Image: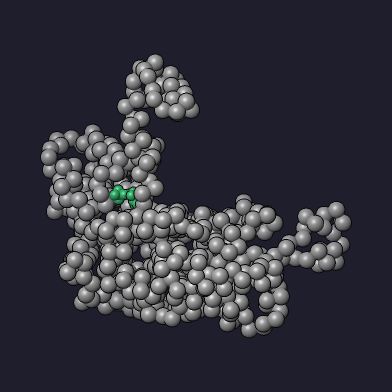
Amino acid sequence: MPPITQTPEWHALEAHFEELRDQHLRDLFAADPERGQRLTIEVAGSVPERRTGSVPERQTGIYLDYSKNRITDETVELLVALAHRAGLRDRIDAMFRGEKINVTENRAVLHVALRAPEGAVIDVDGENVVPAVHAVLLKMADFADRVRAGSWTGHTGAPVRNVVNIGIGGSDLGPSMAYEALRDFSRRDLTFRFVSNIDGNDFWEAVHGLDPAETLFVVSSKTFTTLETLTNARSAREWLLAGLTDVDESTVAKHFVAVSTNAAEVAKFGIDTENMFEFWDWVGGRYSYDSAIGLSLMVAIGPDRFGEMLAGFRSIDEHFRTTAFEENLPVLLGLIGIWYDDFFGAETLAVLPYNQYLARFPAYLQQLDMESNGKSVDRDGHPVTMSTGPIVWGQPGTNGQHAFYQLVHLGTKLIPCDFIGFVHANHELGDHHDLLMANLFAQTEALAFGKTREAVEAEGVPAFQVPHRTFPGNRPTNTILAERLTPFTLGQLVAIYEHKVFTQGAIWNIDSFDQWGVELGKSLANRIVPQLQLEVSSALDHDSSTNALIRRYRRLRA
Ligand code: F6P
Protein backbone atom coordinates (compact mmCIF):
# COMPACT_ATOMS: atom_id res chain seq x y z
CA MET A 1 0.00 0.00 0.00
CA PRO A 2 1.31 3.53 -0.76
CA PRO A 3 1.96 5.86 2.18
CA ILE A 4 -1.37 7.22 3.40
CA THR A 5 -0.32 10.72 2.35
CA GLN A 6 -0.26 9.55 -1.28
CA THR A 7 -3.79 8.19 -1.35
CA PRO A 8 -6.77 9.90 -2.98
CA GLU A 9 -8.40 10.11 0.46
CA TRP A 10 -5.51 12.15 1.85
CA HIS A 11 -5.46 14.39 -1.23
CA ALA A 12 -9.21 14.93 -0.87
CA LEU A 13 -8.63 16.11 2.69
CA GLU A 14 -5.87 18.45 1.51
CA ALA A 15 -8.23 20.02 -0.99
CA HIS A 16 -11.01 20.20 1.58
CA PHE A 17 -8.63 21.85 4.03
CA GLU A 18 -8.00 24.66 1.54
CA GLU A 19 -11.76 25.31 1.43
CA LEU A 20 -12.24 25.18 5.16
CA ARG A 21 -9.08 26.70 6.63
CA ASP A 22 -10.42 30.26 6.67
CA GLN A 23 -13.98 29.49 7.67
CA HIS A 24 -14.95 30.62 11.13
CA LEU A 25 -16.84 28.54 13.65
CA ARG A 26 -19.18 31.53 14.02
CA ASP A 27 -20.24 31.09 10.39
CA LEU A 28 -20.43 27.31 10.59
CA PHE A 29 -22.78 27.59 13.57
CA ALA A 30 -24.79 30.41 12.03
CA ALA A 31 -25.35 28.42 8.84
CA ASP A 32 -26.48 25.31 10.66
CA PRO A 33 -28.69 25.78 13.72
CA GLU A 34 -28.70 22.05 14.50
CA ARG A 35 -24.93 21.74 14.51
CA GLY A 36 -24.55 21.75 18.31
CA GLN A 37 -26.97 18.83 18.66
CA ARG A 38 -25.98 16.94 15.55
CA LEU A 39 -22.20 16.80 15.94
CA THR A 40 -22.42 14.84 19.17
CA ILE A 41 -22.25 11.22 20.25
CA GLU A 42 -23.41 9.45 23.34
CA VAL A 43 -22.02 6.09 24.37
CA ALA A 44 -24.57 4.42 26.56
CA GLY A 45 -23.45 3.33 29.98
CA SER A 46 -24.34 -0.12 31.23
CA VAL A 47 -24.82 -1.44 34.68
CA PRO A 48 -21.64 -3.12 35.81
CA GLU A 49 -21.54 -6.47 37.50
CA ARG A 50 -20.64 -6.51 41.14
CA ARG A 51 -19.45 -9.40 43.20
CA THR A 52 -21.84 -8.51 45.98
CA GLY A 53 -25.51 -8.39 45.16
CA SER A 54 -25.76 -4.71 46.07
CA VAL A 55 -27.24 -2.32 43.58
CA PRO A 56 -24.72 -0.05 41.90
CA GLU A 57 -25.41 3.60 41.36
CA ARG A 58 -27.09 4.43 38.07
CA GLN A 59 -24.52 4.65 35.31
CA THR A 60 -25.01 6.79 32.28
CA GLY A 61 -23.11 7.30 29.14
CA ILE A 62 -20.37 9.57 28.00
CA TYR A 63 -21.44 12.45 25.80
CA LEU A 64 -19.05 13.97 23.28
CA ASP A 65 -19.80 17.33 21.73
CA TYR A 66 -17.44 17.75 18.79
CA SER A 67 -19.40 20.54 17.12
CA LYS A 68 -16.91 23.24 18.16
CA ASN A 69 -14.30 21.83 15.79
CA ARG A 70 -13.30 23.34 12.48
CA ILE A 71 -15.06 20.63 10.56
CA THR A 72 -18.20 20.06 8.54
CA ASP A 73 -20.16 16.91 7.80
CA GLU A 74 -17.99 16.58 4.72
CA THR A 75 -14.82 16.68 6.84
CA VAL A 76 -16.12 13.78 8.89
CA GLU A 77 -16.98 11.83 5.72
CA LEU A 78 -13.52 12.42 4.29
CA LEU A 79 -11.77 11.52 7.53
CA VAL A 80 -13.83 8.35 7.83
CA ALA A 81 -12.89 7.47 4.25
CA LEU A 82 -9.25 7.96 5.24
CA ALA A 83 -9.71 5.59 8.18
CA HIS A 84 -11.16 2.96 5.85
CA ARG A 85 -8.32 3.46 3.36
CA ALA A 86 -5.80 3.01 6.19
CA GLY A 87 -7.42 -0.33 7.07
CA LEU A 88 -8.49 0.76 10.54
CA ARG A 89 -11.26 -1.84 10.68
CA ASP A 90 -8.79 -4.68 10.00
CA ARG A 91 -6.35 -3.29 12.53
CA ILE A 92 -9.04 -3.16 15.23
CA ASP A 93 -10.08 -6.72 14.44
CA ALA A 94 -6.45 -7.85 14.44
CA MET A 95 -5.91 -6.37 17.90
CA PHE A 96 -9.02 -8.04 19.33
CA ARG A 97 -8.01 -11.35 17.70
CA GLY A 98 -4.65 -11.26 19.48
CA GLU A 99 -2.51 -10.88 16.38
CA LYS A 100 1.04 -9.68 16.89
CA ILE A 101 0.45 -6.11 15.81
CA ASN A 102 3.37 -4.83 17.88
CA VAL A 103 5.65 -5.69 15.00
CA THR A 104 8.99 -4.47 16.32
CA GLU A 105 8.64 -6.57 19.46
CA ASN A 106 6.64 -9.34 17.81
CA ARG A 107 3.93 -9.17 20.46
CA ALA A 108 0.18 -9.20 20.62
CA VAL A 109 -1.48 -6.07 22.01
CA LEU A 110 -4.23 -7.25 24.26
CA HIS A 111 -5.06 -4.77 26.97
CA VAL A 112 -8.65 -5.42 25.85
CA ALA A 113 -8.28 -8.98 27.18
CA LEU A 114 -7.69 -7.53 30.67
CA ARG A 115 -11.34 -6.58 30.82
CA ALA A 116 -12.83 -9.32 28.68
CA PRO A 117 -15.73 -11.10 30.39
CA GLU A 118 -15.19 -14.52 31.87
CA GLY A 119 -15.91 -17.04 29.16
CA ALA A 120 -14.55 -14.91 26.32
CA VAL A 121 -11.93 -16.52 24.14
CA ILE A 122 -8.89 -14.55 23.01
CA ASP A 123 -5.99 -16.67 21.83
CA VAL A 124 -2.32 -15.79 21.88
CA ASP A 125 -0.10 -18.43 20.30
CA GLY A 126 -3.02 -20.86 20.39
CA GLU A 127 -3.80 -20.35 24.06
CA ASN A 128 -6.88 -18.59 25.44
CA VAL A 129 -5.57 -15.87 27.77
CA VAL A 130 -8.89 -14.92 29.38
CA PRO A 131 -8.91 -17.63 32.12
CA ALA A 132 -5.44 -16.51 33.27
CA VAL A 133 -6.64 -12.89 33.41
CA HIS A 134 -9.54 -13.87 35.65
CA ALA A 135 -7.36 -16.11 37.82
CA VAL A 136 -5.07 -13.15 38.54
CA LEU A 137 -8.05 -10.88 39.22
CA LEU A 138 -9.27 -13.39 41.80
CA LYS A 139 -5.84 -13.60 43.42
CA MET A 140 -5.69 -9.80 43.52
CA ALA A 141 -9.16 -9.64 45.06
CA ASP A 142 -8.20 -12.13 47.75
CA PHE A 143 -5.09 -10.10 48.60
CA ALA A 144 -6.95 -6.79 48.54
CA ASP A 145 -9.68 -8.17 50.80
CA ARG A 146 -7.10 -9.43 53.28
CA VAL A 147 -5.31 -6.10 53.46
CA ARG A 148 -8.59 -4.20 53.73
CA ALA A 149 -9.81 -6.56 56.46
CA GLY A 150 -6.59 -6.11 58.46
CA SER A 151 -5.75 -9.78 58.20
CA TRP A 152 -2.55 -9.28 56.18
CA THR A 153 -0.11 -8.76 59.01
CA GLY A 154 3.53 -7.78 58.92
CA HIS A 155 6.63 -8.86 60.80
CA THR A 156 5.36 -7.74 64.22
CA GLY A 157 1.86 -9.10 63.70
CA ALA A 158 0.46 -5.60 63.15
CA PRO A 159 -1.97 -5.22 60.25
CA VAL A 160 -0.85 -3.32 57.18
CA ARG A 161 -2.14 0.25 57.16
CA ASN A 162 0.15 1.80 54.54
CA VAL A 163 0.55 0.64 50.96
CA VAL A 164 3.43 2.09 48.93
CA ASN A 165 3.50 1.35 45.21
CA ILE A 166 6.99 1.38 43.73
CA GLY A 167 7.04 1.63 39.94
CA ILE A 168 7.61 4.07 37.12
CA GLY A 169 6.03 4.94 33.76
CA GLY A 170 3.11 2.64 33.14
CA SER A 171 3.78 0.91 36.45
CA ASP A 172 3.13 4.17 38.28
CA LEU A 173 1.16 6.67 36.19
CA GLY A 174 -1.92 4.50 35.78
CA PRO A 175 -2.37 3.37 39.39
CA SER A 176 -1.43 6.76 40.83
CA MET A 177 -3.70 8.67 38.43
CA ALA A 178 -6.58 6.28 39.10
CA TYR A 179 -6.02 6.33 42.85
CA GLU A 180 -6.26 10.14 42.81
CA ALA A 181 -9.27 9.99 40.50
CA LEU A 182 -11.10 7.51 42.72
CA ARG A 183 -9.96 8.69 46.14
CA ASP A 184 -13.58 9.19 46.99
CA PHE A 185 -14.13 5.46 46.67
CA SER A 186 -11.00 4.56 48.60
CA ARG A 187 -10.46 3.36 52.13
CA ARG A 188 -9.62 6.60 53.91
CA ASP A 189 -8.25 4.81 56.96
CA LEU A 190 -5.45 3.29 54.90
CA THR A 191 -2.57 5.33 53.47
CA PHE A 192 -1.58 4.96 49.82
CA ARG A 193 1.58 6.43 48.39
CA PHE A 194 3.37 6.11 45.06
CA VAL A 195 7.08 6.37 44.54
CA SER A 196 8.55 6.46 41.04
CA ASN A 197 11.45 8.85 40.64
CA ILE A 198 15.02 7.67 41.14
CA ASP A 199 15.50 10.99 42.89
CA GLY A 200 15.82 9.98 46.54
CA ASN A 201 13.56 12.88 47.50
CA ASP A 202 10.63 10.92 46.14
CA PHE A 203 11.36 7.88 48.29
CA TRP A 204 12.12 10.06 51.30
CA GLU A 205 8.70 11.68 51.11
CA ALA A 206 6.88 8.46 50.23
CA VAL A 207 7.87 6.79 53.50
CA HIS A 208 7.93 9.92 55.63
CA GLY A 209 5.99 9.36 58.83
CA LEU A 210 5.16 5.73 58.06
CA ASP A 211 5.70 2.93 60.54
CA PRO A 212 7.64 0.11 58.84
CA ALA A 213 5.71 -2.44 60.89
CA GLU A 214 2.48 -1.34 59.17
CA THR A 215 3.86 -0.74 55.68
CA LEU A 216 3.55 -2.94 52.63
CA PHE A 217 5.45 -2.27 49.40
CA VAL A 218 3.97 -3.26 46.05
CA VAL A 219 6.91 -3.43 43.65
CA SER A 220 5.36 -2.98 40.22
CA SER A 221 7.53 -3.57 37.20
CA LYS A 222 6.73 -5.44 34.05
CA THR A 223 10.37 -6.31 33.44
CA PHE A 224 11.63 -6.14 37.04
CA THR A 225 14.86 -4.72 35.67
CA THR A 226 13.98 -1.01 35.64
CA LEU A 227 16.74 0.98 37.34
CA GLU A 228 14.45 3.44 39.13
CA THR A 229 12.13 0.77 40.50
CA LEU A 230 14.82 -1.62 41.65
CA THR A 231 16.78 1.21 43.27
CA ASN A 232 13.68 2.37 45.14
CA ALA A 233 12.80 -1.23 46.05
CA ARG A 234 16.28 -1.79 47.52
CA SER A 235 15.97 1.43 49.52
CA ALA A 236 12.57 0.26 50.72
CA ARG A 237 14.04 -3.04 51.87
CA GLU A 238 16.80 -1.23 53.78
CA TRP A 239 14.31 1.22 55.30
CA LEU A 240 12.10 -1.65 56.39
CA LEU A 241 14.82 -3.80 57.89
CA ALA A 242 16.40 -0.80 59.64
CA GLY A 243 13.06 0.07 61.20
CA LEU A 244 12.27 -3.38 62.61
CA THR A 245 13.99 -5.65 65.11
CA ASP A 246 14.58 -9.40 65.05
CA VAL A 247 14.42 -9.46 61.29
CA ASP A 248 15.06 -12.58 59.25
CA GLU A 249 14.44 -13.96 55.76
CA SER A 250 10.68 -13.99 56.21
CA THR A 251 10.48 -10.28 57.06
CA VAL A 252 10.76 -9.09 53.46
CA ALA A 253 8.15 -11.59 52.31
CA LYS A 254 5.61 -10.15 54.75
CA HIS A 255 6.13 -6.56 53.62
CA PHE A 256 6.75 -6.90 49.90
CA VAL A 257 4.62 -8.15 47.07
CA ALA A 258 5.46 -7.88 43.39
CA VAL A 259 3.60 -7.27 40.16
CA SER A 260 5.60 -8.45 37.20
CA THR A 261 6.01 -10.68 34.19
CA ASN A 262 9.45 -11.78 35.43
CA ALA A 263 9.25 -14.36 38.23
CA ALA A 264 12.99 -15.09 38.18
CA GLU A 265 13.96 -11.48 38.95
CA VAL A 266 11.21 -11.20 41.57
CA ALA A 267 12.60 -14.25 43.38
CA LYS A 268 16.14 -12.89 43.07
CA PHE A 269 15.03 -9.75 44.88
CA GLY A 270 13.76 -11.87 47.79
CA ILE A 271 10.04 -11.59 47.20
CA ASP A 272 8.11 -14.81 47.61
CA THR A 273 6.74 -15.65 44.15
CA GLU A 274 3.56 -16.78 45.94
CA ASN A 275 3.10 -13.06 46.49
CA MET A 276 3.71 -12.17 42.89
CA PHE A 277 0.83 -11.01 40.73
CA GLU A 278 1.39 -11.87 37.14
CA PHE A 279 0.75 -10.12 33.90
CA TRP A 280 1.93 -10.76 30.39
CA ASP A 281 4.15 -9.43 27.63
CA TRP A 282 1.05 -8.68 25.53
CA VAL A 283 0.16 -5.89 27.96
CA GLY A 284 2.08 -2.71 27.21
CA GLY A 285 3.26 -0.78 30.29
CA ARG A 286 1.15 2.27 29.45
CA TYR A 287 -1.87 0.02 28.85
CA SER A 288 -1.46 -1.94 32.07
CA TYR A 289 -3.18 -0.33 35.01
CA ASP A 290 -6.26 -2.52 34.64
CA SER A 291 -3.97 -5.55 34.98
CA ALA A 292 -2.27 -6.53 38.25
CA ILE A 293 -0.39 -3.24 37.95
CA GLY A 294 -3.59 -1.83 39.45
CA LEU A 295 -3.11 -3.90 42.63
CA SER A 296 -2.58 -0.94 44.97
CA LEU A 297 -5.62 0.73 43.38
CA MET A 298 -7.65 -2.40 44.01
CA VAL A 299 -6.61 -2.39 47.67
CA ALA A 300 -7.67 1.26 47.85
CA ILE A 301 -11.09 1.00 46.20
CA GLY A 302 -11.83 -2.69 46.72
CA PRO A 303 -12.39 -5.48 44.20
CA ASP A 304 -16.01 -4.54 43.50
CA ARG A 305 -15.20 -1.00 42.46
CA PHE A 306 -12.24 -2.29 40.47
CA GLY A 307 -14.68 -4.59 38.68
CA GLU A 308 -16.92 -1.61 37.89
CA MET A 309 -13.94 0.17 36.42
CA LEU A 310 -13.23 -2.85 34.20
CA ALA A 311 -16.87 -2.79 33.10
CA GLY A 312 -16.40 0.84 32.06
CA PHE A 313 -13.38 -0.10 29.97
CA ARG A 314 -15.33 -2.99 28.47
CA SER A 315 -18.27 -0.81 27.46
CA ILE A 316 -15.93 1.35 25.38
CA ASP A 317 -14.10 -1.68 23.98
CA GLU A 318 -17.42 -2.95 22.66
CA HIS A 319 -18.37 0.42 21.30
CA PHE A 320 -14.99 0.81 19.58
CA ARG A 321 -15.06 -2.68 18.12
CA THR A 322 -18.60 -2.67 16.82
CA THR A 323 -19.69 0.89 16.00
CA ALA A 324 -19.51 2.48 12.58
CA PHE A 325 -16.68 4.99 12.43
CA GLU A 326 -19.08 7.94 11.95
CA GLU A 327 -20.60 7.17 15.35
CA ASN A 328 -17.51 5.81 17.04
CA LEU A 329 -16.36 8.11 19.82
CA PRO A 330 -12.67 7.14 20.06
CA VAL A 331 -12.39 6.92 16.27
CA LEU A 332 -13.85 10.40 15.85
CA LEU A 333 -11.55 11.85 18.51
CA GLY A 334 -8.61 10.26 16.71
CA LEU A 335 -9.70 11.52 13.30
CA ILE A 336 -10.31 15.06 14.55
CA GLY A 337 -6.82 14.97 16.09
CA ILE A 338 -5.35 13.96 12.75
CA TRP A 339 -7.21 16.82 11.07
CA TYR A 340 -5.42 19.29 13.34
CA ASP A 341 -2.02 17.54 13.51
CA ASP A 342 -1.63 16.90 9.81
CA PHE A 343 -3.67 19.54 8.04
CA PHE A 344 -3.75 22.55 10.36
CA GLY A 345 -0.22 21.80 11.58
CA ALA A 346 -1.18 21.93 15.26
CA GLU A 347 1.60 20.59 17.43
CA THR A 348 -0.14 20.04 20.73
CA LEU A 349 -3.30 18.85 22.42
CA ALA A 350 -4.43 20.32 25.74
CA VAL A 351 -6.47 18.00 27.95
CA LEU A 352 -8.38 19.98 30.54
CA PRO A 353 -10.33 18.01 33.12
CA TYR A 354 -12.75 20.09 35.17
CA ASN A 355 -12.45 17.83 38.17
CA GLN A 356 -9.65 18.12 40.70
CA TYR A 357 -9.61 14.35 41.18
CA LEU A 358 -8.41 14.08 37.57
CA ALA A 359 -5.37 16.26 38.23
CA ARG A 360 -3.03 13.45 37.13
CA PHE A 361 -5.04 12.56 34.03
CA PRO A 362 -3.01 14.76 31.63
CA ALA A 363 0.25 13.25 32.96
CA TYR A 364 -1.18 9.78 32.46
CA LEU A 365 -2.22 10.65 28.90
CA GLN A 366 1.23 12.01 28.17
CA GLN A 367 2.71 8.54 28.43
CA LEU A 368 -0.26 6.85 26.81
CA ASP A 369 -0.21 9.10 23.76
CA MET A 370 3.37 10.31 23.42
CA GLU A 371 5.13 7.01 24.17
CA SER A 372 2.71 5.31 21.80
CA ASN A 373 2.68 7.69 18.86
CA GLY A 374 5.92 9.63 19.19
CA LYS A 375 7.33 7.76 16.19
CA SER A 376 8.99 8.96 12.99
CA VAL A 377 9.29 5.69 11.11
CA ASP A 378 6.39 3.53 10.02
CA ARG A 379 5.79 -0.12 10.80
CA ASP A 380 8.10 -1.12 7.97
CA GLY A 381 10.89 1.17 9.12
CA HIS A 382 10.39 3.87 6.49
CA PRO A 383 10.35 7.54 7.50
CA VAL A 384 6.81 8.75 8.00
CA THR A 385 5.52 11.37 5.59
CA MET A 386 3.31 13.28 8.00
CA SER A 387 3.35 14.71 11.50
CA THR A 388 2.57 12.04 14.12
CA GLY A 389 1.60 12.20 17.81
CA PRO A 390 0.76 15.55 19.40
CA ILE A 391 2.44 16.97 22.49
CA VAL A 392 -0.14 16.31 25.19
CA TRP A 393 -0.38 18.56 28.20
CA GLY A 394 -2.91 20.11 30.53
CA GLN A 395 -4.06 20.94 34.02
CA PRO A 396 -7.35 20.75 35.79
CA GLY A 397 -9.81 23.61 35.32
CA THR A 398 -10.09 26.23 36.57
CA ASN A 399 -6.40 26.46 37.59
CA GLY A 400 -5.26 26.36 33.97
CA GLN A 401 -7.48 29.35 33.19
CA HIS A 402 -5.33 31.50 35.44
CA ALA A 403 -2.11 30.17 33.97
CA PHE A 404 -1.94 29.34 30.28
CA TYR A 405 -5.37 30.01 28.79
CA GLN A 406 -4.21 33.49 27.76
CA LEU A 407 -2.06 31.82 25.10
CA VAL A 408 -4.82 29.43 24.11
CA HIS A 409 -7.26 32.34 23.57
CA LEU A 410 -4.97 35.04 22.19
CA GLY A 411 -1.62 33.48 21.30
CA THR A 412 -0.37 32.78 17.79
CA LYS A 413 -0.63 29.02 18.06
CA LEU A 414 -3.56 26.77 17.32
CA ILE A 415 -4.14 24.59 20.38
CA PRO A 416 -6.96 22.07 20.11
CA CYS A 417 -8.36 21.28 23.56
CA ASP A 418 -10.33 18.43 25.11
CA PHE A 419 -12.51 19.66 27.96
CA ILE A 420 -13.74 16.98 30.35
CA GLY A 421 -16.53 17.71 32.81
CA PHE A 422 -19.17 16.03 34.95
CA VAL A 423 -22.80 16.88 35.56
CA HIS A 424 -22.64 16.01 39.26
CA ALA A 425 -19.97 16.98 41.74
CA ASN A 426 -18.25 14.36 43.85
CA HIS A 427 -19.08 16.63 46.79
CA GLU A 428 -21.82 19.22 46.50
CA LEU A 429 -20.47 22.27 48.28
CA GLY A 430 -22.52 25.44 47.99
CA ASP A 431 -22.54 26.52 44.37
CA HIS A 432 -18.97 25.36 43.64
CA HIS A 433 -20.02 22.88 41.01
CA ASP A 434 -22.19 25.26 39.00
CA LEU A 435 -19.37 27.79 39.10
CA LEU A 436 -16.90 25.17 37.93
CA MET A 437 -19.07 23.95 35.08
CA ALA A 438 -20.08 27.45 34.05
CA ASN A 439 -16.39 28.06 33.52
CA LEU A 440 -16.01 24.96 31.38
CA PHE A 441 -18.96 25.89 29.17
CA ALA A 442 -17.81 29.50 28.99
CA GLN A 443 -14.31 28.57 27.92
CA THR A 444 -15.42 26.44 24.99
CA GLU A 445 -17.85 29.17 23.95
CA ALA A 446 -15.21 31.89 24.19
CA LEU A 447 -12.63 29.81 22.33
CA ALA A 448 -15.03 29.04 19.48
CA PHE A 449 -16.77 32.37 19.04
CA GLY A 450 -14.34 34.88 20.48
CA LYS A 451 -15.31 38.53 20.73
CA THR A 452 -15.27 40.77 17.72
CA ARG A 453 -13.66 44.17 17.47
CA GLU A 454 -17.12 45.67 17.05
CA ALA A 455 -18.37 44.07 20.24
CA VAL A 456 -15.35 45.32 22.15
CA GLU A 457 -15.75 48.84 20.76
CA ALA A 458 -19.45 48.83 21.57
CA GLU A 459 -18.50 48.36 25.22
CA GLY A 460 -16.69 51.69 25.16
CA VAL A 461 -13.24 50.16 25.53
CA PRO A 462 -10.50 52.78 24.88
CA ALA A 463 -9.24 52.50 21.30
CA PHE A 464 -5.68 51.59 22.25
CA GLN A 465 -6.96 48.56 24.19
CA VAL A 466 -9.32 47.27 21.52
CA PRO A 467 -6.83 45.03 19.68
CA HIS A 468 -5.68 43.57 22.98
CA ARG A 469 -9.20 42.77 24.09
CA THR A 470 -10.48 41.35 20.80
CA PHE A 471 -10.76 37.57 20.79
CA PRO A 472 -10.38 36.00 17.35
CA GLY A 473 -12.12 32.77 18.38
CA ASN A 474 -12.18 29.84 15.93
CA ARG A 475 -10.17 27.81 18.46
CA PRO A 476 -11.34 24.21 18.41
CA THR A 477 -12.49 22.15 21.35
CA ASN A 478 -14.09 18.83 22.17
CA THR A 479 -16.28 18.60 25.25
CA ILE A 480 -16.61 15.26 27.00
CA LEU A 481 -19.44 15.40 29.48
CA ALA A 482 -20.14 12.50 31.81
CA GLU A 483 -22.65 12.28 34.59
CA ARG A 484 -20.35 11.60 37.51
CA LEU A 485 -16.76 10.54 38.12
CA THR A 486 -17.08 6.90 39.17
CA PRO A 487 -14.85 3.86 38.66
CA PHE A 488 -17.04 2.95 35.69
CA THR A 489 -16.68 6.39 34.10
CA LEU A 490 -12.94 6.44 34.68
CA GLY A 491 -12.64 3.10 32.88
CA GLN A 492 -14.64 4.56 30.00
CA LEU A 493 -12.49 7.67 29.80
CA VAL A 494 -9.22 5.78 29.78
CA ALA A 495 -10.45 3.31 27.18
CA ILE A 496 -11.62 6.19 24.97
CA TYR A 497 -8.12 7.63 24.92
CA GLU A 498 -6.47 4.22 24.49
CA HIS A 499 -8.56 3.60 21.39
CA LYS A 500 -8.13 7.13 20.14
CA VAL A 501 -4.35 6.63 20.24
CA PHE A 502 -4.82 3.28 18.49
CA THR A 503 -6.88 4.92 15.74
CA GLN A 504 -4.24 7.53 15.06
CA GLY A 505 -1.38 5.02 15.11
CA ALA A 506 -3.25 2.82 12.63
CA ILE A 507 -3.78 5.71 10.22
CA TRP A 508 -0.18 6.86 10.51
CA ASN A 509 0.87 3.19 10.09
CA ILE A 510 3.23 3.35 13.04
CA ASP A 511 3.86 0.83 15.80
CA SER A 512 2.05 2.44 18.73
CA PHE A 513 3.17 -0.30 21.10
CA ASP A 514 6.96 -0.13 21.26
CA GLN A 515 9.03 2.53 23.04
CA TRP A 516 12.57 2.39 21.69
CA GLY A 517 12.87 6.12 22.27
CA VAL A 518 13.54 5.57 25.97
CA GLU A 519 16.50 3.24 25.44
CA LEU A 520 19.38 5.49 24.39
CA GLY A 521 19.22 7.76 27.43
CA LYS A 522 19.02 4.70 29.71
CA SER A 523 22.17 3.12 28.29
CA LEU A 524 24.14 6.38 28.32
CA ALA A 525 23.16 6.92 31.97
CA ASN A 526 24.46 3.46 32.83
CA ARG A 527 27.75 4.42 31.24
CA ILE A 528 27.96 7.72 33.10
CA VAL A 529 27.13 6.35 36.58
CA PRO A 530 30.65 4.99 37.31
CA GLN A 531 32.27 8.03 35.74
CA LEU A 532 30.65 10.30 38.34
CA GLN A 533 32.51 8.50 41.07
CA LEU A 534 35.98 8.68 39.50
CA GLU A 535 38.74 11.19 40.32
CA VAL A 536 37.98 14.74 39.27
CA SER A 537 40.81 14.63 36.73
CA SER A 538 40.17 11.18 35.24
CA ALA A 539 39.68 11.14 31.48
CA LEU A 540 36.27 11.41 29.82
CA ASP A 541 35.41 10.71 26.21
CA HIS A 542 32.04 12.40 25.72
CA ASP A 543 31.45 15.59 23.75
CA SER A 544 32.92 18.77 25.25
CA SER A 545 29.63 19.85 26.85
CA THR A 546 28.95 16.54 28.59
CA ASN A 547 32.60 16.26 29.67
CA ALA A 548 32.51 19.74 31.20
CA LEU A 549 29.25 19.08 33.04
CA ILE A 550 30.55 15.81 34.50
CA ARG A 551 33.83 17.44 35.54
CA ARG A 552 32.01 20.29 37.23
CA TYR A 553 29.72 17.86 39.05
CA ARG A 554 32.67 15.79 40.23
CA ARG A 555 34.60 18.86 41.37
CA LEU A 556 31.71 20.24 43.40
CA ARG A 557 30.92 16.84 44.92
CA ALA A 558 34.55 16.09 45.82
O1 F6P B 1 9.74 4.33 30.02
C1 F6P B 1 9.93 3.10 29.40
C2 F6P B 1 9.15 2.01 30.05
O2 F6P B 1 9.52 0.82 29.46
C3 F6P B 1 7.65 2.21 29.98
O3 F6P B 1 7.10 1.82 28.79
C4 F6P B 1 7.20 1.42 31.14
O4 F6P B 1 5.89 1.72 31.48
C5 F6P B 1 8.22 1.83 32.18
O5 F6P B 1 9.42 1.92 31.44
C6 F6P B 1 8.38 0.91 33.35
O6 F6P B 1 8.76 -0.37 32.98
P1 F6P B 1 8.65 -1.59 33.95
O7 F6P B 1 7.22 -1.78 34.29
O8 F6P B 1 9.23 -2.75 33.22
O9 F6P B 1 9.44 -1.28 35.20
Residue at 68% over, 54% down: 411
Residue at 21% over, 36% down: 241
- The spot of residue 357 in percent (x, y) is 46, 59
Number of marks drawn: 0
Whether residue 61 is visible here, answered yes or no, is: no
Closer-to-camera residue (268/258): 268
Up/down of 12 relative to 532, above or below: below
Up/down of 231 relative to 264, above or below: above
Here the colouring is one colour
Q: Quadrant of residue 76?
A: bottom right
Closer-to-camera residue (226/511): 511
Residue at 19% over, 53% down: 276
Up/down of 109 relative to 62, above or below: above
Q: Quadrant of residue 249?
A: top left
Residue at 87% over, 62% down: 460
Quadrant in the picture for the C terminus? top left
Closer-to-camera residue (179/40): 40
Work out which residue is located at the far bottom of the displayed protein and give it.
34
- The spot of residue 1 in percent (x, y) is 41, 68
- The spot of residue 544 in percent (x, y) is 47, 25
Q: Quadrant of residue 487?
A: bottom left
Closer-to-camera residue (113/84): 84
- The spot of residue 135 in percent (x, y) is 18, 66
Whether residue 462 is visible here, answered yes or no, is: yes
